[in-house]
């Protein structure tokens, strides 16, 4: 579907030895290209927080890399409009079936379809996992341990934060000491000050949110202009999405990106190892040979591709001898409390979540549930806010218009709450097929008792804080955000899909590298953890290659 | 929420931003060409009816006029929400989610609108469009309260159709229109220029000036 | 290709009932001044103040001593920088408090007085009194700015230091006043020295030197804070952080013991500082141009980008330092050591 803005969704752009220059209107950067019939070192499926990071690091280390993305290759400066409807083009809107007791809404809040993945429209909240979460089973008694030490992960967080020039506070008030963020925190918006005021009234710590939006210039990228359209694509390039960071880096180091290229199946040779991928581009199915295949499609598309690549040698799908591919899908509880302030907040200005409270991620006393949650100040755009209002409150008529005319006086606090991994929450293939003939994924999700207790706790606590900040006429909305899990990494082939390097236990030249690796969800937005983990996996793969441990 | 008593007539909506016109910024640095193309397209190219037949489209329009009444606007200034609903169904656009056991969008809308018409006949023995304004509002409130006759809705859940399809899609279209940005004082397009003054009660010269407080919302403390 | 605004007649409804339920005017009211008006007013203020100062002085014809001229020009540059900077920053703050008008108005008065001081030696007591008022305004400003910082959640936090009223800024106004007082003092001292009253020049030079050094150290903190806020994203942003304290130390040394080598080092570093002020102005202008929308988006970038009006204050301080050195050059030896 082409739009009035550009034909990026209609015509491939990364071709003919060049790819779009994301920093300039109408300009290009050179791109290396690889023949399909010669095996490249790595084929990477997806260019989000997992794929693009790996592509950049592996290409930098001298490997030949081709990275595929089903979405378009945009130049934000000219392809992104200040318009919610137009920018839906960044979401994964292909139909998926959502079931279970609490079916999740898919498309906008948890998936992206563009080179750069969902980071092109993510909210840029750049938090770290609490150290204990990497051993949540051992230390806290729930979920599963990660197969990696927290100190190693925290050192990679620092690298990820530097690569994305995160603007964050000088002293972070929770957890072990971390180094200073590379860029300074942003000015607090009025909506962020609501959280700050409430937190101070309640005697709880708060701070400016570490945010993946530039607070000062960086190379050709402009600093933030506080236009507030972050969640539908940054037209300033202040947002340090994968598109303007690792994708650019990957191209510079000789990786090839193939946009508008949907990978449908991984081919497995007679020796049971992956030989390449079948992908659909420019109206036809094609095949790219590869020595190693990395799947980075996120928690729905990664299991979908692995399951759809079933073959006689792997009848239940690739990497699925544990039977866990697609299982243990997690989301974040994204419930919110909203209220009306006397003063004008005008929350459409600036990055929407500029203040954060991680109190209940680090405090274990006084909780009747496992896991933790963070919550942040809010700044939804009009249709985003209106849809959550009507679907939760059912308000219509003149009352709806009146309610919406409080838009500039609204403030809200929204949680990112850790759900528990459950095998019954999963991604499967349905019997229906999409336009390309690929089976449509079916997602099942149900909250467990613990998830609900956490939501209740957060509703009470956020409400109290909002009231302490001076908000009146409070009400509550429910939703979910983010996806985690589906291809858990671990040390035991019986209880995980891949090892700590993202390498499949079943097929030694098949890797997974994205948010689906998470054994637990953590009470923070997942993007920085995915980037940090991908940087770590990249280092491990590069080390393997040096040892001659790769195909 | 219990359905509202039709006897309580609500006051009509009035905008707190009577002198704000977001399109007044058209030639300023708040608009870039990408945005101009999108907004011009929305204002000039209202899609023709292609999916619904004429009577159903008229019913849809009548329902929209209850969901988002715009009595203060002349016909040519009205935001034609129904036109984009029809276009979405004609183009069979997905929003990424189909709930298990629920029909696709086309089937849901067809059954949902038929259900509203059935419900009108069941309660009042006449069509929805023949009802008074109060009766129309009350009918939709009953559907939202889960009091509709399930048989009328041909197997779809009336309340989830009402909130999940009808209300949701309507506000997605309505509040994406510049006239709606005006009435809620939304800054609107903001690229290349964003905002300078971020604090409470702080406003840039290119933002809407609030002339009075928004009206009270019924049922909220 | 530009897309024209579509031909449509619709607007939000304009006929509204009486403004019932209105909020207190003090909260909802905001000045309706446009950014263009502000720039015009600021520019006119700069020019008018300059013309007024020169006009007043043109009737004098009593040319002040060289040191006094240096200090007065320094004061004028500092005041001009404060006028432009405070007019814009306080406009950004929507002139929420009436006191916020004080800074640009007093800066304009200071600019006029300083220019008058640079051209004629007449009416020195009035000028000294006016400069004294400037210093007092600057000190009050420090108090207001501190209160503004502390009034937000977080109190004395980095975020508030970065983004609330800049704590050091009113100091520049006080410095403009000090430079003016210095100019008057330098002129008087010079006359007394010519009458054979030794020691006055040295004392005036000593005072000006110390204030220059103090100003340079204060400015280091201010520039340091703001460039730190910008994460020193460009290595050139370190230049003033290194140059200013060095120059401050050099002029302190020259003031404490004005031997020729120290004076020459102080002079060279002052020249470098003045040059940095000019280069910095250019770099800040470049900074504005490379922000989103460049100068076309000036209603945002002149305010959010690096302040173009700030670096000239470096040159102003340098001129103040030259005045001190000039006095120390000629009268630097302690009179007890005998004639030069």
Image: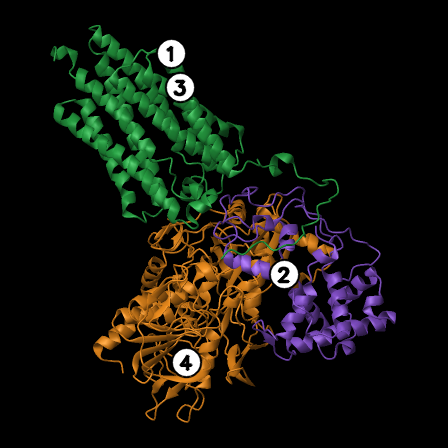
Q: Tell me the residue that label 1 is attached to.
A: C59
At 30% from the left and 28% from the top, the residue drawn is: C317
Judge depth for marks 3 and 4 and give the one in front.
Answer: 3
Q: Tell me the residue that label 2 is attached to.
A: B44
Residue nearest the viewer, comparing C270 with A451:
C270
Q: Chain of mark 4?
A: A
Tell me the distance, in whole angstroms, between the alpha carbons under discs 4 and 2.
58 Å
**First of labels 1, 3 by sequence position:** 3
Which image quadrant: the C terminus of chain A?
A: bottom left
Tell me the distance, in whole angstroms, between the alpha carbons under discs 3 and 2.
58 Å
Q: Tell me the residue that label 3 is attached to.
A: C53
Where residue C203 appears, x then y in whole percent?
24, 15
- Eyeballing the image, is A153 above or below C249? below
Mark 2 Cα within 10 Å, few/some/many (few <14, many 20+)? few
Q: Chain of mark 3?
A: C
Judge depth for marks 3 and 2 and give the one in front.
Answer: 2
Q: Tell me the residue that label 4 is attached to.
A: A495
Where residue C107 appears, x then y in whole percent?
42, 25
Left or right for C34, reference A165: right
| Callouts 3 and 2 on one subunit | no
């Amino acid at each position: 579907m082409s739009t009035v803005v550009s034909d990026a969704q209609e015509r491939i752009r990364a071709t003919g030895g060049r790819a779009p220059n994301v920093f300039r209107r109408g300009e290009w950067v050179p791109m290396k290209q690889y023949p399909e019939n010669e095996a490249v070192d790595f084929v990477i499926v997806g260019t989000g927080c997992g794929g693009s990071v790996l592509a950049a690091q592996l290409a930098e280390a001298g490997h030949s890399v081709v990275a595929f993305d089903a979405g378009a290759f945009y130049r934000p400066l000219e392809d992104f409009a200040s318009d919610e409807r137009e920018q839906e083009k960044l979401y994964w809107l292909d139909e998926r079936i959502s079931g279970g007791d609490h079916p999740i809404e898919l498309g906008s809040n948890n998936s992206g379809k563009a080179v750069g993945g969902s980071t092109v429209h993510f909210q840029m909240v750049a938090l770290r996992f609490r150290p204990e979460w990497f051993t949540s089973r051992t230390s806290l008694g729930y979920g599963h341990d990660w197969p990696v030490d927290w100190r190693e992960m925290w050192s990679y967080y620092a690298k990820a934060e530097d690569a994305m020039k995160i603007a964050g506070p000088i002293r972070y008030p929770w957890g072990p000491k971390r180094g200073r963020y590379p860029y300074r925190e942003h000015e607090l918006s009025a909506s962020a000050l609501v959280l700050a005021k409430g937190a101070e009234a309640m005697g709880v710590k708060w701070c400016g949110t570490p945010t993946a939006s530039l607070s000062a210039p960086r190379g050709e990228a402009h600093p933030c202009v506080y236009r507030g359209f972050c969640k539908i694509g940054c037209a300033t390039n202040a947002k340090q999405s994968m598109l303007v960071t690792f994708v650019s880096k990957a191209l510079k180091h000789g990786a090839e990106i193939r946009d508008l290229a949907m990978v449908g199946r991984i081919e497995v040779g007679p020796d049971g190892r992956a030989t390449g991928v079948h992908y659909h581009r420019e109206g036809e199915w094609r095949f790219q040979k590869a020595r190693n295949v990395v799947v980075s499609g996120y928690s729905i598309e990664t299991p979908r591709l692995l399951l759809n690549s079933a073959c006689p040698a792997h009848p239940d799908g690739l990497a699925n001898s544990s039977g866990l591919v697609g299982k243990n899908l997690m989301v974040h509880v994204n419930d919110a409390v909203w209220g009306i302030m006397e003063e004008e907040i005008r929350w459409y200005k600036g990055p929407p979540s500029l203040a954060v409270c991680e109190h209940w991620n680090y405090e274990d006393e006084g909780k009747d549930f496992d896991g933790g949650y963070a919550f942040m100040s809010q700044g939804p755009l009009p249709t985003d806010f209106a849809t959550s209002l009507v679907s939760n409150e059912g308000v219509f008529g003149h009352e709806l218009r009146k309610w919406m005319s409080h838009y500039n006086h609204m403030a809200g606090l929204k949680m990112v709450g850790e759900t528990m991994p459950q095998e019954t929450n999963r991604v499967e293939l349905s019997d229906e097929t999409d336009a390309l003939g690929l089976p449509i994924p079916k997602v099942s999700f149900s909250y467990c008792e613990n998830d609900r207790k956490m939501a209740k706790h957060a509703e009470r606590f956020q409400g109290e804080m909002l009231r302490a900040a001076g908000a009146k006429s409070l009400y509550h909305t429910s939703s979910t955000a983010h996806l985690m899990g589906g291809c858990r990494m671990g040390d035991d082939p019986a209880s995980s899909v891949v090892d700590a390097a993202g390498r499949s236990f079943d097929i030694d030249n098949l890797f997974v590298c994205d948010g689906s690796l998470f054994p637990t969800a953590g009470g923070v937005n997942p993007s920085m953890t995915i980037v940090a983990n991908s940087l770590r996996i990249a280092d491990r793969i590069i080390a393997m290659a040096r040892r001659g441990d790769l195909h | 929420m219990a359905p509202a008593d039709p006897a309580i007539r609500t006051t009509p909506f009035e905008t707190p931003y009577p002198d704000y016109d977001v399109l007044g910024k058209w030639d300023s640095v708040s608009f870039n060409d990408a945005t101009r193309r999108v907004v011009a397209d929305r204002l000039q190219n209202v899609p023709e009816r292609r999916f619904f037949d004429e009577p159903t489209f008229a019913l849809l329009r009548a329902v929209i006029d209850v969901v988002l009444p715009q009595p203060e606007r002349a016909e040519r200034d009205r935001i034609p929400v129904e036109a984009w609903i029809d276009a979405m169904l004609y183009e069979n656009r997905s929003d990424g989610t189909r709930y298990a056991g629920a029909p696709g969008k086309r089937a849901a809308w067809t059954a949902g609108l038929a259900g509203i018409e059935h419900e009108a006949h069941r309660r009042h023995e006449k069509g929805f469009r023949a009802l008074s304004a109060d009766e129309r509002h009350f009918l939709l409130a009953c559907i939202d309260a889960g009091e509709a006759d399930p048989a009328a809705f041909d197997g779809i859940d009336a309340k989830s159709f009402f909130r999940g399809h009808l209300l949701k899609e309507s506000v997605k279209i309505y509040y994406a229109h510049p006239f709606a940005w005006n009435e809620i004082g939304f800054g609107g397009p903001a690229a290349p220029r964003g905002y300078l003054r971020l604090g409470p009660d702080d406003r840039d010269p290119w933002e809407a000036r609030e002339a009075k407080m928004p009206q009270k919302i019924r049922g909220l403390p | 290709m530009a897309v024209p605004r579509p031909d449509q007649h619709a607007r939000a409804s304009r006929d509204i009932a009486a403004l019932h339920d209105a909020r207190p005017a003090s909260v909802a009211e905001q000045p309706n001044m446009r950014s263009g008006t502000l720039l015009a007013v600021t520019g006119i203020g700069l020019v008018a103040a300059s013309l007024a100062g020169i006009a007043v002085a043109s009737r004098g014809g009593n040319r002040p001593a060289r040191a006094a001229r240096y200090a007065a020009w320094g004061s004028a540059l500092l005041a001009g920088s404060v006028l432009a900077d405070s007019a814009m920053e306080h406009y950004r703050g929507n002139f929420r408090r009436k006191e916020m008008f004080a800074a640009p108005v007093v800066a304009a008065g200071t600019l006029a007085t300083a220019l008058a001081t640079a051209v004629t030696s007449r009416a020195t007591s009035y000028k000294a009194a006016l400069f004294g008022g400037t210093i007092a305004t600057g000190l009050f400003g420090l108090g207001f700015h501190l209160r503004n910082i502390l009034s937000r959640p977080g109190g004395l936090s980095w975020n508030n230091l970065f983004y609330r009223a800049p704590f050091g800024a009113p100091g520049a106004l006080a410095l403009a006043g000090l430079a003016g007082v210095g100019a008057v003092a330098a002129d008087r001292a010079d006359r007394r020295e010519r009458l054979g009253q030794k020691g006055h020049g040295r004392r005036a030079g000593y005072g000006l030197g110390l204030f220059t050094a103090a100003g340079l150290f204060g400015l280091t903190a201010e520039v340091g804070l703001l460039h730190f806020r910008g994460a020193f994203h460009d290595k050139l942003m370190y230049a003033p952080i290194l140059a200013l304290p060095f120059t401050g130390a050099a002029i302190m040394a020259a003031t404490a013991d004005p031997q020729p080598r120290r004076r020459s080092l102080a002079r060279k570093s002052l020249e470098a500082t003045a040059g940095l002020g000019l280069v910095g102005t250019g770099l800040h202008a470049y900074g504005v141009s490379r922000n989103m929308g460049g100068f076309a988006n000036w209603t945002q970038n002149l305010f959010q980008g690096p302040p173009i009006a700030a670096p000239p204050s470096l040159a102003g301080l340098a001129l103040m330092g030259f005045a001190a050195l000039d006095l120390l050059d000629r009268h630097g030896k302690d009179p007890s050591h005998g004639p030069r």
